[in-house]
């Protein structure tokens, strides 16, 4: 593993343990060149996934990026009472479901719906925040209508 500080190619694993959700192995490493310590995460990847995005009448394909998904979910959940472990579990669950479908291509719309389903059960504010970007709300009325539908579901 290349050292992020000095670029040296060799490092020694000092400690390994599973993450709290059990979906990865956390490894503490020490560079053999500069002695700096850093952390890496090792995850199982069943298959390479390609995300299909619809953009301006065309389509764009890009590799599935788990970290990008986690960042967007974390932004929606910022300053909300949601533990980081819960967000990790949500993203790991989505990734696992996508990888076990047998398909190598998945639409960004499908991923967005999976995130919304997960956030709906965790926190209604994070759910609405994510939906506002995912569904491209352009006016305050869009928020009001969507929030109203979330309140009705919560009451029912």
Image (cartoon, grey):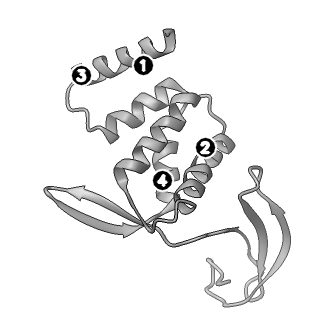
The Cα atoms of the two marked residues, 2 and 4, are separated by 10 Å
Residue at 54 percent across and 31 percent down: it is 79
Indicate the secondary structure of the residue bearing disc 2.
Answer: helix
State whether residue 117 is above or below residue 103: above
SS category of the residue bearing label 4: helix
**Residue corresponding to mark 4:** 69
Which numbered tag is attached to residue 140? 3
Circles 4 and 3: CB distance less than 8 Å?
no
Q: Visible in this render: residue 23?
A: yes
Classify the position of the N terminus by image quarter: bottom right
Q: Are marks 3 and 1 in contact (CB under 8 Å)?
A: no
The image shows residue 71, relative to residue 122, as above or below, that is below
Image-based side of 153 in relation to 30, left or right:
left
User: Residues under labels 2 and 3: Cα distance?
Assistant: 27 Å
Please tell me whether mark 1 sits on a helix, a strand or a loop: helix
**What is the crowding at mark 4: few (fewer than 14 residues within 10 Å), some, or many (at least 20)?**
some
Q: Earlier in the sequence, mark 1 or mark 4?
A: 4
Pick whichever, 71 or 118, lies toward us. 118
Q: Residue at x 63, y 48 (%)?
A: 88
Give the mark nearest the N terminus, 2 or 4: 4
Whole-number angstrom distance, CA of label 4 to CA of label 3: 26 Å
| Crowd class of label 1 (few under 14; some 14 to 19; many from 20; radius 10 Å) | some
């Amino acid at each position: 593993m290349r050292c992020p500080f000095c670029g040296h190619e060799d490092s020694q694993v000092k400690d390994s343990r599973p993450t709290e959700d059990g979906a990865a192995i956390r490894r503490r490493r020490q560079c053999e060149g500069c002695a700096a310590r850093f952390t890496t995460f090792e995850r199982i990847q069943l298959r390479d996934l390609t995300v299909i995005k619809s953009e301006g009448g065309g389509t764009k394909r890009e590799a599935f990026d788990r970290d990008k998904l986690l960042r967007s979910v974390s932004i929606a959940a910022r300053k909300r009472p949601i533990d980081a472990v819960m967000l990790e579990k949500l993203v790991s669950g989505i990734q696992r479901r996508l990888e076990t479908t047998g398909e190598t291509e998945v639409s960004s719309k499908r991923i967005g719906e999976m995130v919304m389903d997960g956030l709906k059960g965790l926190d209604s504010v994070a759910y609405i925040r994510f939906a506002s970007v995912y569904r491209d709300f352009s006016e305050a009325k869009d928020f009001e209508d969507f929030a109203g539908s979330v309140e009705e579901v919560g009451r029912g």
